[in-house]
Amino acid sequence: MSGSFRKVLDLSSGDSQNAGIKPITFVRQVIAGCTYPRILQGDNLPPDARLRAQKLLSHFDGGSIGSYTESCGMTYVRNTIAKFISLRDGGVWSCPEQVFITVDIQRALMVMLRLLCPSEGVSAVMIPDPAPHTLARLLERMDVVPVTYQLQEQSGWSVEKMELNRAIQVSRGQCFPRAIYITNPGNPTGHVQSRESIQGVIRFAAEEQLFLLVYQDSVFADGSEFLSYKRVLVEMGEPYSDRVQLASMHSLSNGIMGECGFRMGYMELVNVDEAVMLYTEVLLTGDLCPPVIGQIALDVMADPPRPGEPSYSLYTQEVASRRMTLKHNMSRAVEFINDLPGFSCQSVQSGIFIYPHLTLPHTALTHSQSVGLLYSRSLLKDQGVCVGFSEDHTHSQSCCHLRMCVLMPSDELEEALRRLRCFHFQFLKKYCDPGESLNEPQQSV
Amino acid sequence: MSGSFRKVLDLSSGDSQNAGIKPITFVRQVIAGCTYPRILQGDNLPPDARLRAQKLLSHFDGGSIGSYTESCGMTYVRNTIAKFISLRDGGVWSCPEQVFITVDIQRALMVMLRLLCPSEGVSAVMIPDPAPHTLARLLERMDVVPVTYQLQEQSGWSVEKMELNRAIQVSRGQCFPRAIYITNPGNPTGHVQSRESIQGVIRFAAEEQLFLLVYQDSVFADGSEFLSYKRVLVEMGEPYSDRVQLASMHSLSNGIMGECGFRMGYMELVNVDEAVMLYTEVLLTGDLCPPVIGQIALDVMADPPRPGEPSYSLYTQEVASRRMTLKHNMSRAVEFINDLPGFSCQSVQSGIFIYPHLTLPHTALTHSQSVGLLYSRSLLKDQGVCVGFSEDHTHSQSCCHLRMCVLMPSDELEEALRRLRCFHFQFLKKYCDPGESLNEPQQSV
């Protein structure tokens, strides 16, 4: 194995701008205008970016982004987001006072866990497996026990009611589940839940009196309709629509914006008591206010240029190009990976990750207790490709899943795939028993 | 009382840009350039701002501020800060690996409390009275008990060894003090500790095995030398210099920058075990990374334009003007307030607040359990001037302290003072027994 490569390609984190995807121009123009208002004079920026910056500045105290804002985010931006949610959900009402802007959704989730999980007793949250890779650590920090429910890979990572029941039964007597955490679309699995599937989870939450913590983001794939939990909940009617409590979270880091560095997100609380909302506000007051730049970016995300405005054409072109790149990369990567011996990858409906299953002969395990660690470390060392991984101990062979972000320029993806193939065959040669054939792609289940 | 005023003047929060102080141009230019690199072409920005933006961009992954940075902040910026600290401390070595960049110092303090205060037993932190107004709430959120030591107003808010001993003795058997929190310069009192005073606190921390949590900021007043705890500690030599553990915190919100909206700060850890520093990093990894815009501003704060560079002249002029305004406002406000019956205000050496003591006849208390609340609420309602307050129950009369930020354009300050005087005499007339004379300024002690 060589170890000679030009640069490291990081597919592990979902950081699209690091991978070479350009930011959306309009958001950067508005931020630059708000930051250094002198460039609003002259023709540095298109007129609608100038206007937006001036409008936003007029809502900052002292007319400057250097001032504190309200602790839950600027009223103006919370209004914009509420309108955006309502539009997304086919007109279902969204109240600005129920929208809380936070320094990314980690913070929103911390606040919710603090509210939901009293320090007496062992509080737990049901979480999917697989889940976003930062989730387990966050629960640990908050002294909250995870109760894991398995997503069903063979049926496209579906959430099964039977599995939810099994998981909560197992937890009885050991801990007190307060909430169920969902990502829809799935992170890192990319599955999108149907209305029926969402309804099933809502009914389960109602039966078990669990708070719904939902992380949702924009959907990329053609033909997969995005339904928010909020909308499905409202449309289910009573007794669900006015009782099941929900926090729906959204981040600037993923989706169309991909502005990871700004650290910004929001959550909408539904059916939550006013006193609890007030306490949410009190907890957020401790942070003084969310960073202003991210709030500006949220405003643009929720209210992008409209048809007829000068920046509309460039904005739609940039968004379309990003979606096209992602769609192309998704199918290319899934096809490529499924051609490699030992790999099996579900087709992906949304999100920015693929999550292939890798089966290696048992002999690979004699070299490491963790085949995922061995494989991903060697891949980074030998070919400079960084991927995430999760172990899989449910099979008789050495198995793991790899997490790979594919939102990057297509030529970068090609380079990453080329290196992966090169590495993969060398790895098989080195670690796997030549007696065991892996020339044909293996199905993991 | 009238209640007719043009706009609310908020002196409570220390938000200088809200009050009308302009931001430092260079920092805004560099951020705008990093955000929307197209304006780096042409002559929108001076050459040194362009260069700085290009240099910073070259250190971001993918050349974009939309990417994640390292969890403790960019290595490049941590280096800049370490050099800045070393320069501030007369050459005392500062190691970039010991500098942690966080989303403001609330977050840094939360991480330190998490490290220092185990969940078993009742952990406590010694805090001054008065203290920054956000401190008590933060301790409460972290389930940490405050052990209060009183600053001595009559001797310019000094920290007295005897009082520290008294406070820790009282706490025995009730809780376990793990750390002592200091603000130097004092917030909101504006006192600056001498070398001897700092040495006294360090010896006390060593004797009681307390971790030092120090919040320090730039110093404005003439003739008051700023000595950092770090420098004094190192210069004390053994057994202190290599043993007493210290976290020194600094924020972008106060001081020269006054960029409250960016939510950014850093801390330097001294004499802290490597394993603990690693765990600090692990805790911060949960936040993924600090917001990028604040990191850029920190870089500029720590390494401003130098003599001979194009922006040097404007930068020094802006800083000087801010200092001059502050100096002028400080003496003007202290003098003005001391002329009002019932008020007594210590002269202030640093910071952005004045913290006058207000003594009212006992009759005022018949109208409210809290004279501070009654006074500040009425002031806001009648004259639109918002100030902070703390109760003072140590006197036989109705007493409180007001917290008033004076970093604002001087004409705004004049307007606030005018309204305060107008309100004050009406308040006395309404609430105070005409038999008790308050025509002469009262000394509070």
Image: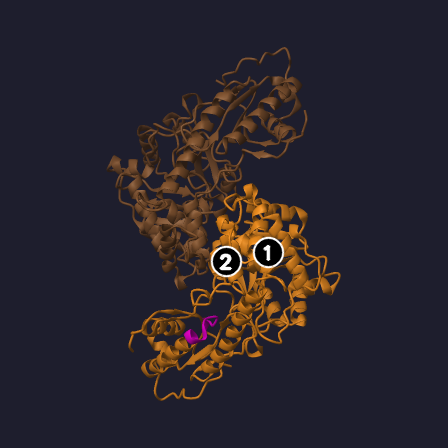
Chain colours: A brown, B orange
Observer-nearest of A242 and B26 = B26
* Left or right of A53 on screen, residue B69: right
Q: Residue type at mark 1: give it.
A: Met
Q: Residue furthest left?
A: A238
- Residue depicted at 58% across the width and 27% down the height: A372
Mark 1 / mark 2, whichever is N-terminal? 2
The chain to which mark 2 is attached is B
- Residue A394 rendering spot, x and y as whole percentages: 52, 22
Which chain letter goes with mark 1? Answer: B
Q: CA distance from mark 1 to mark 2?
A: 23 Å
Residue in view at x 33 percent, y 53 percent = A275
Residue A442: where, in percent of width, then height?
52, 16
> What residue did someone put label 1 on?
B267
| Residue under pointer 2 | B28
Asked if one can make out residue A339 in the rendered structure from this viewpoint, the answer is: yes
What range is drawn magenta here? B402-413
Q: Is residue A402 above or below residue B262?
A: above
Give the percent coordinates (x, y) of residue A103: 46, 49
